[in-house]
Image (cartoon, coloured by chain):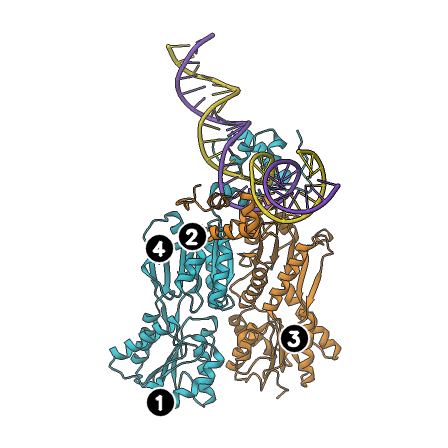
Chain colours: A cyan, B orange, C purple, D yellow
Amino acid sequence: MDSTPPLGRKVTVRDIAAGCGVSRATVSLVLRGSPLVNKDTRARVEAELRKQGYVYNRAAANLRRRTSSSIALVINELANPFFAEFAAGVDEIVGEAGMVTLLGSSSESPRREQAVLGSMIEHGPGGIILSPAEGSDARHVLAAVGARTPLLLFNRELAGEQPEYAHWDTLLLDNQQGAREATAHLVAQGHRRIAFFGGHRDSSSCRQRRAGYREAMQAAGLPVAPHWEVECAPTRLDAARCAEALFAGDPAPTAAVCYNDAVALGLMHGLTQRGLAPGRDFALTGFDDIAEAALAAPSLTTLAAAPRARGRQAAQMLLERLRDPTAQARRIVAPVQLVIRASSCPPA
Amino acid sequence: MDSTPPLGRKVTVRDIAAGCGVSRATVSLVLRGSPLVNKDTRARVEAELRKQGYVYNRAAANLRRRTSSSIALVINELANPFFAEFAAGVDEIVGEAGMVTLLGSSSESPRREQAVLGSMIEHGPGGIILSPAEGSDARHVLAAVGARTPLLLFNRELAGEQPEYAHWDTLLLDNQQGAREATAHLVAQGHRRIAFFGGHRDSSSCRQRRAGYREAMQAAGLPVAPHWEVECAPTRLDAARCAEALFAGDPAPTAAVCYNDAVALGLMHGLTQRGLAPGRDFALTGFDDIAEAALAAPSLTTLAAAPRARGRQAAQMLLERLRDPTAQARRIVAPVQLVIRASSCPPA
DNA sequence: GACTACATTTGGATCGTTCCAAACCAGGCC
DNA sequence: GGCCTGGTTTGGAACGATCCAAATGTAGTC
């Protein structure tokens, strides 16, 4: 009986088995808490495990069992607090399920996204949660991940998505409904000249939000002047810079539905510099409900997407898919909630 | 020769070997780009790899080679933009090195931290980057990760760290120097009554920043009144609530060095509600240089810690450690940079 | 004592890859 | 022909766990 804990080598089931005079199979049963093994034997083995400082090798187990214990999470921009919250939510659920999250960031580059997916897939994740980079398309994603590993798309749809990719689950935000509600709220406040401000024309979320805005305007019987639809990068800085454009034509709007909170806060800045007090002389709404929305002056009316809850939901959807790989693909459009604060005042 | 791509099963080197009439060993050599294999053979094998849609099984390879291709990253609070940036930096370098990041979040709970570390270690990461939860101590961390896996500590030191843990690398921010510079800057602006605002007494970063503040005050020959050191949770909300405390005694300060940016922004809010204009009637500085610091009104003087660069640095340090496991442990204190903006005005 | 019934334990084969020492093959040289 | 050399290729044994069918022991029954 050679029960000395090995020095250079890792401790394996073999060492434990030798250490307390049972077979490897028995140790393995103990490790998995099987009811087959005798009480005393279990106690002896468990003592030996502690004594030798055994650590389970999940990779070896996964190899033999043909299972996986990880979920890959590929995010377009991790540094964005919205996606960081989302990632935290995913990791929460993945952790609760006893699995581990493989993290990757694509930095909004479809090429890097493909490379990252390719690297992830070699590690054999049970499934993948992908928040696509702008411009990412379905063919490349399919080429990188193959048809075997379940994939869940978050936040954006892929360009060129065909029925053949229909086995992918999708979790989207209801951008259109959100923008519609924000617009309707401004209308209800008494505004007639309402702009849509910010975002990139080619981003799908921007298109959807703008569609919701137009829909609500039309439903209220209100016209949309061309210079009320202003495009800008989705950053505070660029939004502040573009504020001018709203007042470049006649008639000037008295309110704006903004692409997101960052843009709304930038616009506030721009308005202030023009001598207009946001929340008094001009009403606006955001999108996302980031932490600062509640603390801005004036506090920002916005649409809460609850990114952490969405992360949890995405992870749960994927875990369910792992349990039943043949189930029908799901497409969930999560509602967003209008949070009314001070910025959406009635017209001056 | 059975070259039909298997249906239910995964494609393995065995299938490729059979598919083009060579041995598994040869396929393996091709996969790793060995110069030993003949040009024509290589081409044949590579064609077969593409044809069958082979994906490399890194877990199996790691098992045999006794190597690892992952780095574990355990963060105290991923939703905090500072740490999200840090994580993005880590992942950048880890990805460049052809490895993958295992993500875990401890939500500032030492208990969860230990559980997460325990789960991580079973996946056999090559090394671990840990940004400890508040109150996490060295003994528990050691128990969870063992002495075998290299560990790098970021941002905080562990309670009860003894010489026996001296093999852990450490990357810290120079909190003390930062606070000293901020204080000295306010002194140079002409302030005499300077407060230190926010943070928890028992957090090590808060202690260090406060020490820097006191040092600078002493160096300038300035006294520190007891009610100038105000404690509060490191959130905007609580900071706004605690602003009052600064003016609860005589004499009132004319400037404050804040624990971090969130607190500084909260204090601005609190000042405004008291009828004081931050950046005109009262000077303040932050810490972290979060995105909004530059866009706040007034823009916030603060200390830039460059979290993404720190993440890259941490990953690099750990990768070097993997290359040379016996090298002397390193302890790097990264300087932070004072960014002067509008909030640190001279006295009114 | 032979039988079944049940609880517990076990040795090999296996997962997909890599290592290693040995084998193979062609060409050149004595 | 025998021998060496250098470039290629290869079968079998690992890595650390799990599966499986079969073996072992222990009572209980007739």
Chain hosting mark 1 = A
Tag 1: amino acid: Ala
Please tell me whether mark 1 sits on a helix, a strand or a loop: loop
Circles 2 and 1 on the same subunit:
yes
Please tell me which of labels 2 and 4 falls first in the chain: 2
- Seen from the viewer's position, the closer of residues B20 and B99 is B20
Q: Is residue B60 above or below residue A189?
A: above
Tag 3: amino acid: Gln
Instruction: Point out residue A173 in the picture as x, y percentages from the top left corner.
Output: 37, 66
Chain hosting mark 3 = B
Number of the label disc, if any, that sits on residue A167: 4
Front disc: 4 or 1: 4
C-alpha gap between disc 3 and disc 1: 43 Å
C-alpha gap between disc 2 and disc 1: 52 Å
Q: Is residue A342 above or below residue A311?
A: below
Please tell me which of labels 4 and 1 falls first in the chain: 4
Instruction: Point out residue B216 in the picture as x, y percentages from the top left corner.
Output: 72, 76
Give neighbour class at mark 4: few <14, some 14-19, many 20+ (Cα, 10 Å).
Answer: some
Say which residue label 2 marks.
A149
